[in-house]
Amino acid sequence: AMAVRVLEEEPGFNAGVGSALTRDGTVEVDAAIMDGNGLRVGGIGAVPFLRRPIDLARQVLEDGQHCLLVGDGAWEFARERGHERARPEDMITERSRQKLAAHRAEQGNSGGTVGACAIDAAGHVASATSTGGMTGKRPGRVGDSPLPGCGTYADDRAGAASATGTGEAIMRVTMARVCTDEMRRGATAAQAAAASVRDLAERTGLDAGIICIDARGGIGVA
Ligand code: GLY
């Protein structure tokens, strides 16, 4: 969570400050964190103007009642945990405005979702992902990042993975689960990352990226 929190504060990435804008010019963030020790997961989806998405996802995980909160209920939970709605000027950057303008002119899209995978000395793995989603998205759209097995997955018996790219493609193939399944069958993290990127390309015709760590501590990036 700490690594992702730092990246959320960095305006050059599409997460937290600098998040991609919806077609209405607003910010709605998605995030998840998963603990491979016991398959505990916490996610939040389409939460407007939330500055520290990964902290709220972690609070959902630690609360333990639900795996994913969205909409008004997510904000109610956030307020109970001390979060305050950010001012638009604290999260919208000149770059995110320009990207929305380019999207409206059909010149471009998004990217820059942030993620981290980790393993501790006891061999427990975890992954975390945070994003503003796709530039020009419809308000209310939830991407792959907060969905277990899609943009984020961690299982001590396999490894941990965090994906980036077009959520609609990543969700269809459940990319993070494809990656961790490969590791569970014995692939190294590097092999599993490459296999999951190849699988997504073959099945959807699109590109995506992934980072992962296997249960032996090997890392994969593709
Ligand atoms: N992968 C980020 C998103 O589609 O929301």
Image (cartoon, rainbow, N blue to C red):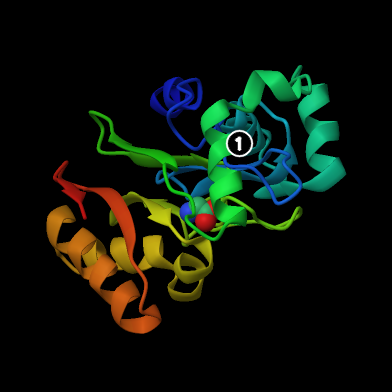
Above/below status of 13 relative to 138: above
Residue, disc 1: 97
- Residue 94 in which image quadrant: top right
Q: Is residue 72 left or right of residue 99?
A: right
Residue positioned most to the bottom: 203
Quick check: 135 left or right of 150? right
Q: What is the crowding at mark 1: few (fewer than 14 residues within 10 Å), some, or many (at least 20)?
A: some
Relative depth, front residue between 136 and 178: 136
Tell me which corner region of the image, top left, top right, bottom left or bottom right, holds residue 218. Answer: top left
Q: Position of residue 174 (x, y in %)?
A: 45, 69
**In-front residue for pair 175/85:** 85
| Callout 1 amino acid | Arg
Q: Is residue 46 left or right of residue 12?
A: right
Query: Residue at horizontal 40%, vertical 42%?
Result: 127
User: Residue 164: where, in percent of width, then height?
Assistant: 40, 52
Res 120 seen here? yes
Tell me if residue 95 comes above or below residue 86 in the rendering.
below
SS class, disc 1: helix
User: Which is nearer the eye, 221 or 42?
Assistant: 221
Q: Residue most toward the front? A: 105
* Residue 194 in the image: above or below residue 10: below
